[in-house]
């Protein structure tokens, strides 16, 4: 099949009523199939139909984020996301789970296929209208935050424009920029907290409508955490508090001295070098050119995919004030069986992180699509899905000079620092969400207080007195996109950072073998449960003491913290 260029793919709003009728027909055909081949044919027709519908949903999503001022795609994204959440595909699940050909289905598609069906069926027993309401609330948050403007230097500027001042090497400049951001969110916190409160309520209702005791249990099933859950993730957080939070405090003491500061405050976070953080040597077009060179050297298969996506317009990483800021993503264009990568390059070192991270997702998506005919296997369980992207970030260290020239060493150090900060930060958010979804009621003051307390518990080396009044108004909490948009997801990044270090260690010991582990990871897609997948790759479970101690030792050595402070 000759792939279409991304820009030529036409968007047509799906007819969800007609789609529901077709779903019922596919389910009927599966139930009445006289042979496993007839059943497979009906299932393949459903997969093809769903791919067309989901391609349109993805186009609306992408094009809304490409231009947040485009009201047409704002409305289309909000509509299609809500309709997608309310689309009932349970007749397909029921027909397959009740089929006389279960053993043949297992033989043809693998045992994981029907197991995933059973788990996913449990998520949509009821409350489909509540899932639609959740998407509406998320869209409200997205639209509001993407439209925010900030008064700075006598102008109203976007978050993307303000970011360069926020990370200025000049303390006064970054202090003023961060104050501007905090004040804007503090002034708007009441509305943001209203949306969060409604999200917490509706998510609790979704869980109850499907027979779950609370949202935490529901979310763990949704995220594919079948053989582990709250106990193991709580253990992860406690180990991170014990082993990595003190290491991070040492890091901040080192940074305070390096930057010549009297105290390392909330106005200095994210600044790692006195002359400023390393910046890439060019814009998005330059980064794509250099990434092409990197993948040509790293692996022929990676390079072929990169060039296909680049030629077909499946990258959009250029800077735009109309794009949503503070995030990048990779998603599938199902009709073309190709990934699409979105970013908003602003001249910061994170531009490279995002590009490389998202291409790690792209490699996994494409390799899984090539291996499996069943779309359910194209997507990995949540806590596996971020390992290919996080590991690719670390596999790119040797190629940093392509992007940063003489500052390549500073970039690698910056990335290692952010790994330590991310693991701690995402565990903090996980603990906060545990509180959020188990509290008797949503009370804004209590929610803000818990978020702030956990922030300081995990950031013991940072002085937050410089922004106390804004914190108390909820400014730090309400600008956290993940809590609104990706509940119980962010801990996946912590787990994946830990596993990515395991892959990096294997790569450092033997590049060929390390890369082989990475490829096996990408190829397995969603065909295995998390624990089984980790075992098959020879990687330790990241919520164990063994894994956390290994991460502490690795980061302490690379960041020269053990030698300096022990």
Image (spheres, rainbow, N blue to C red):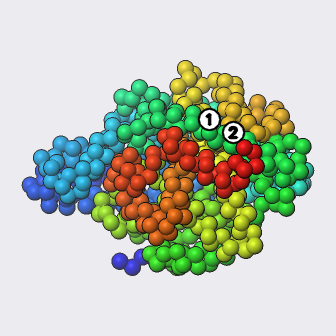
Vertical position of residue 428 compared to residue 65: above or below: above
Q: Which residue corresponds to the image point at 74% horizontal and 63% vertical from the top-left?
A: 410
**Percent of width and height locating residue 360:** 51, 63
Q: CA distance from mark 2 to mark 1?
A: 7 Å
Would residue 320 be visible to someone looking at this image? no
Q: Circle 2 sits in a helix, a strand or a loop, which is it?
A: helix
User: What residue would you read off at disc 1?
Assistant: 242
Q: Circle 1 sits in a helix, a strand or a loop, which is it?
A: helix
Q: How many marks?
A: 2
Would residue 81 be visible to someone looking at this image? yes
| Left or right, residue 437 beside residue 181 | left
For the residue pair 549 and 25, the one nearer the viewer reads as 549
**Percent of width and height locating residue 355:** 60, 65
Q: Which residue corresponds to the image point at 76% horizontal and 32% vertical from the top-left?
A: 473
Mark 1: few, some, or many residues within 10 Å (few <14, many ≥20)?
few
Vertical position of residue 54 compared to residue 445: above or below: below
| Left or right, residue 519 beside residue 136 | left
Would you say the residues marked 2 and 1 are in contact, meaning their CB atoms lie under 8 Å apart?
yes
Q: Quadrant of residue 264?
A: top right
């Amino acid at each position: 099949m000759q792939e279409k260029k991304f820009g030529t793919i036409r968007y047509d709003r799906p007819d969800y009523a007609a789609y529901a009728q077709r779903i019922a027909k596919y389910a009927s055909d599966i139930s009445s199939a006289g042979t496993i081949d007839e059943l497979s044919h009906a299932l393949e027709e459903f997969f093809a139909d769903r791919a067309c519908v989901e391609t349109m949903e993805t186009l609306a999503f992408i094009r809304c984020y490409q231009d947040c001022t485009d009201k047409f795609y704002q409305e289309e994204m909000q509509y299609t996301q809500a309709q997608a959440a309310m689309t009932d595909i349970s007749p397909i699940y029921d027909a397959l789970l009740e089929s006389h050909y279960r053993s043949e289905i297992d033989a043809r598609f693998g045992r994981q296929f029907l197991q995933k069906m059973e788990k996913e069926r449990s998520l949509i027993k009821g409350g489909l209208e509540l899932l639609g309401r959740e998407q509406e609330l998320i869209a409200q948050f997205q639209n509001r935050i993407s439209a925010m403007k900030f008064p700075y230097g006598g102008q109203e500027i976007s978050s993307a424009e303000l970011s360069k001042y926020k990370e200025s090497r000049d303390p006064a400049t970054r202090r003023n920029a961060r104050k501007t951001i905090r004040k804007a969110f503090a002034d708007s916190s009441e509305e943001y907290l209203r949306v969060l409160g409604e999200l917490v309520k509706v998510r609790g209702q979704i869980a109850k409508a499907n027979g779950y005791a609370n949202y935490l249990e529901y979310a763990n099933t949704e995220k594919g955490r079948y053989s582990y859950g709250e106990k193991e993730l709580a253990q992860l957080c406690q180990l991170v508090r014990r082993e990595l939070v003190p290491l991070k405090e040492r890091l901040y003491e080192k940074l305070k001295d390096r930057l010549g500061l009297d105290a390392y405050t909330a106005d200095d976070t994210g600044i790692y070098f006195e002359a400023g953080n390393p910046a890439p040597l060019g814009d998005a077009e330059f980064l794509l050119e250099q990434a092409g060179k990197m993948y040509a050297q790293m692996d022929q298969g990676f390079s072929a995919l990169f060039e296909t996506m680049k030629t077909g317009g499946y990258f959009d990483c250029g800077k735009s004030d109309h794009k949503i800021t503070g995030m990048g993503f990779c998603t599938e264009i199902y009709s073309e069986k190709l990934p699409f990568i979105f970013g908003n390059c602003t001249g910061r070192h994170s531009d490279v992180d995002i590009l490389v991270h998202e291409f790690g997702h792209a490699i996994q998506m494409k390799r899984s699509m090539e291996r499996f005919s069943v779309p359910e296997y194209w997507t990995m369980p949540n806590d596996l899905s971020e390992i290919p992207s996080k590991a690719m970030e670390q596999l790119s260290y040797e190629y940093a000079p392509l992007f940063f020239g003489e500052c390549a060493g500073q970039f690698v150090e910056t990335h290692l620092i952010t790994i330590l900060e991310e693991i701690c930060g995402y565990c903090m958010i996980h603990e906060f969400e545990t509180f959020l979804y188990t509290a008797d009621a949503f009370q804004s003051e209590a929610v803000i207080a818990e978020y702030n307390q956990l922030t300081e518990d995990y950031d013991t080396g940072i002085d937050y007195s410089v922004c106390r009044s804004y914190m108390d108004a909820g400014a730090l909490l309400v600008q956290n996109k993940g809590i609104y948009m990706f509940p119980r997801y962010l801990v996946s990044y912590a787990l994946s950072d830990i596993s990515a270090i395991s892959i990096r260690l294997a790569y450092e010991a033997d590049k060929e073998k390390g890369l082989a582990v990475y490829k096996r990871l990408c190829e397995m897609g969603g065909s295995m449960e998390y624990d089984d997948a980790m075992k098959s790759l020879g990687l330790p479970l990241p919520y164990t003491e063994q894994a956390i101690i290994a991460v502490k030792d690795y980061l302490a050595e690379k960041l020269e913290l053990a030698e300096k402070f022990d």
